[in-house]
Amino acid sequence: MTIALKGGTVVNADRSFRADVICDDGRIVAVGPDLAAPTGARVIDASGSFLLPGGIDPHTHMQFPFMGTVASDDYYTGTAAALAGGTTMIIDFCIPGPQQSLLDGYRQWREWGEKACADWSLHVAITWWSDQVREEMGTLVADHGVNSFKHFMAYKNALMVDDDVLMHSFSRCRELGALPMVHAENGDIVWLLQKALLEAGITGPEGHALSRPPEVEGEAANRAIMIAGAAGVPLYIVHTSCREAHEAIARARANGQRVYGESLIQHLTLDEGEYRNKDWAYAAARVMSPPFRSKDHQKSLWDGLTAGSLQVVATDHCAFNTAQKRMGIDDFTLIPNGTGGIEDRMAVLWTNGVNTGRLTPNEFVAVTSANAAKAFNIYPQKGVIAPGADADIVIWDPAATKTVSAATQHSNIEVNVFEGMALRGLPAITISQGKVVWEGNELKVQRGEGRFVPRQGTAPVFEAMKIRNELTRPTPVKRDPSVHVTP
Ligand code: DUC
Ligand code: ZN
Ligand code: ZN
Ligand code: ZN
């Protein structure tokens, strides 16, 4: 299948320019002015539109078995919703439980993912430590295209790991050229606050936010950054939701540490007042961790995106319907944590970011695709419109409008946290693997046509860190920063 996009403005992270784009056989084959459409090509008039690299959401949980239930979007419905919103690739999480083999978990998640209709990839979570885990991390990097490992500092007695595991795993990541990631919340403190709130008779969704104040996130973010420094690895902090965590990231970066900060579209646009809604189901639908914050925290996140101290906008898409949320009707700690968002991420960010002048269109592309592609080592296969890249393109209509409604969404739940939000700037057409999959508000997708995208380890980054450490070694040497003792 050949497609010629005529008359649009290509918007990449680095620059914008008028150009036609030719896609053939799943790849972008030409980008330039006044290109002749090859014979037999479908010609699409893109005048007045922007051509954006397909969105990459590097933080989703499709079909995730979590808190006694399973997330309601599977890899098919979740990636279909993604494509309808202009996101052409997800990086989801394989989360083997404590004592479970990473390779067994990985095989299970690969099988679940076979029905995806957009390209996808996997991070793998480290929820325990042993020689077997160390070994299997190596196999995943060498043979299975995994180059990032996630660590939960929260969810005590479930997924949470302590500093011992963090140090072991981060050090192993360093050996492998893999990027460690953290969910930064102090799970011990959350646990104590949850108990205290329940004892005080606070059982509703408002207790969720009270049990996870910004301090627990700030503490964990600072701790993870220090451990990453001690281990000599870069660090990716998922769903940075508050000023404390963002400032820890900004400070670390200013000190020359490679720390990447991800924000979520929900935290940028929705605030903690949502948990005080009198309608239990309304508030419970918005329970996710970290929780929505106050406007001051939101401002800090927007400032971080503008200034570059936060680099990614993701969703943590983890969809639960009202019946699932009801598991926590008498106890907020039992409400499954998670919200949707993947279908709305691009348009909500455009409306609240580009239309307000907080982000340029180029910065929009950086935070919705290019930066994630770079951090996870799939750039320029993904994240840019250039010859040779995958033909994942969104024809973006900056004048199109809609009001968000769960009634018209493709995600497999009956609620939407952005319900009623007026949007301006929408994906008119989504092209995935060189095929039009979203057009005229209709999806044309097939189960299983998404491909698993393997990612290599990021060894050059680690080599640079080693050289830099050697070059900048202070004299007299207190602690030789190039020596990282592997525990
Ligand atoms: N937070 C959520 O809200 N859901 C999934 C996991 C997480 O960390
Ligand atoms: Zn140990
Ligand atoms: Zn998380
Ligand atoms: Zn998550």
Image (cartoon, rainbow, N blue to C red):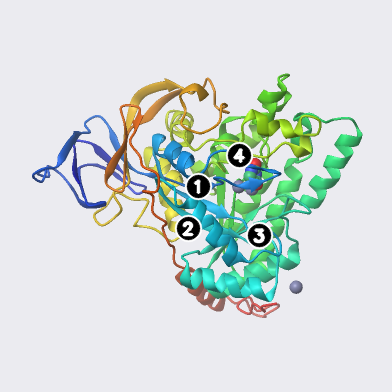
Identify the residue under disc 3.
Answer: 225
CB within 8 Å, label 2 to label 1: yes
Residue in view at x 39 percent, y 22 percent: 401
Identify the residue under disc 2.
Answer: 375
Mark 4 residue element: helix
Identify the mark nearer the N-term, 4 or 2.
4
The quadrant of the image that shows the C terminus is bottom right
Residue in view at x 49 percent, y 38 percent: 342
Q: Is residue 129 left or right of residue 358?
A: right
Other-residue count near label 2 (Cα within 10 Å), few / some / many at <14 / 14–19 / ≥20: many
Identify the mark nearer the N-term, 2 or 3.
3
Examine the rendering and report whether any part of residue 427 can be seen.
yes
Identify the residue under disc 1.
Answer: 312
Q: Residue 195 in the image: x percent, y percent?
A: 87, 41
Could you tell me the amino acid type at mark 1?
Val
The foreground one among 474 and 116 is 116
